[in-house]
Image: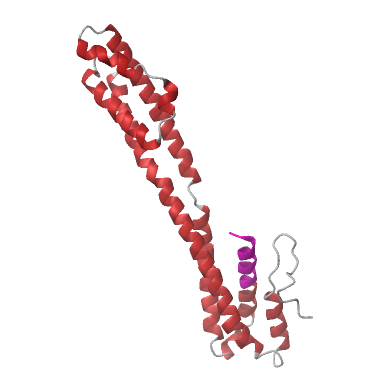
Amino acid sequence: MQKTQESKIKMSRAVSGILTGSEEIVMRTPGLNAAHIALDNLIGETEQHNQGQLNNGKELTTSKNNARSLVVKGIIKICAALAAYGTVATDPAIKILKDKYKVNDSGIKKLRDMQLFTYAYTVYGDALPYATLLDPFATADEVAQLKVLADNYNSSLPQKRTQQSKSALSTQNLEDAVAQIDLLLNDTIDVLVKAWETKEPNFFKAYKNARMIVDAASRKAKPDETTPVP
């Protein structure tokens, strides 16, 4: 949330507090109670959108990175097992596994997301027929686990993008809600309250003071905004 938005929302809450504390006048003013309810609804929306904006997927990045690390380790282990198995094999069809999987660990770590997932499945597919024969280099359970790790990793890939999209939508919705608050205050509530300036001066002054937009950092009223009514 931007500082300007935060200040406007704090101001709108202050305004709502004045209207709540002046219920008799609000109920006597045609349209003001409805406008007050609409204001409170918009304030509630800003809280929801702000929460959605904060959920930008950082925690999902950590989860994805952990899943990626496990897949990389699993691939490296099974690749090493296949290369070792191919080295001692006498069958030419198996011996080719040595050259295919005598790989550089750093190359595996540099693979992009989908490349890594695809490679994990390739390694798993080649290792599966020999899963019970790779011992002591790897166990059948470790071969099976590589597929599980790859699937978990793959499922984590779209989650952050989805959450980022939701966060961006919340940001836009927050902007829209703040704009609606501005419009409601300027075009409706200000006009209705102005009518009480001479009949209910204390109410009017309290409202005008609540309508100040205060800078969150300096706690000073902005020069171009309403100043306190003495």
Position of 1 relative to 128 (above/below): below
162 displayed left or right of 205:
left
Q: How is the image coloured?
A: secondary structure
93 displayed left or right of 188:
left
Position of 49 relative to 184 (above/below): above
- Tell me residue 181's x, y (percent): 56, 74
Which residue is nearer to you in this view: 124 or 97?
97
Residue 22 occupies quadrant: bottom right
- Farthest residue in the bottom direction? 199
**The N terminus lies in quadrant:** bottom right
Residue 138 occupies quadrant: top left
- Tell me residue 30's x, y (percent): 55, 90
- Tell me residue 148's x, y (percent): 31, 32
Position of 169 relative to 98 (above/below): below
Q: Is residue 218 magenta?
A: no
**Is residue 194 visible from the viewing direction of this image?**
yes
**Is residue 82 visible from the viewing direction of this image?**
no
- Farthest residue in the right direction? 230
Which residue is nearer to you in this view: 38 or 171?
171
Please name the residue shown 64% across and 64% down the image: 4
Please name the residue shown 58% across and 91% down the image: 28
Residue 99 occupies quadrant: top left
**The C terminus lies in quadrant:** bottom right
What segment carries the magenta color? 1-13
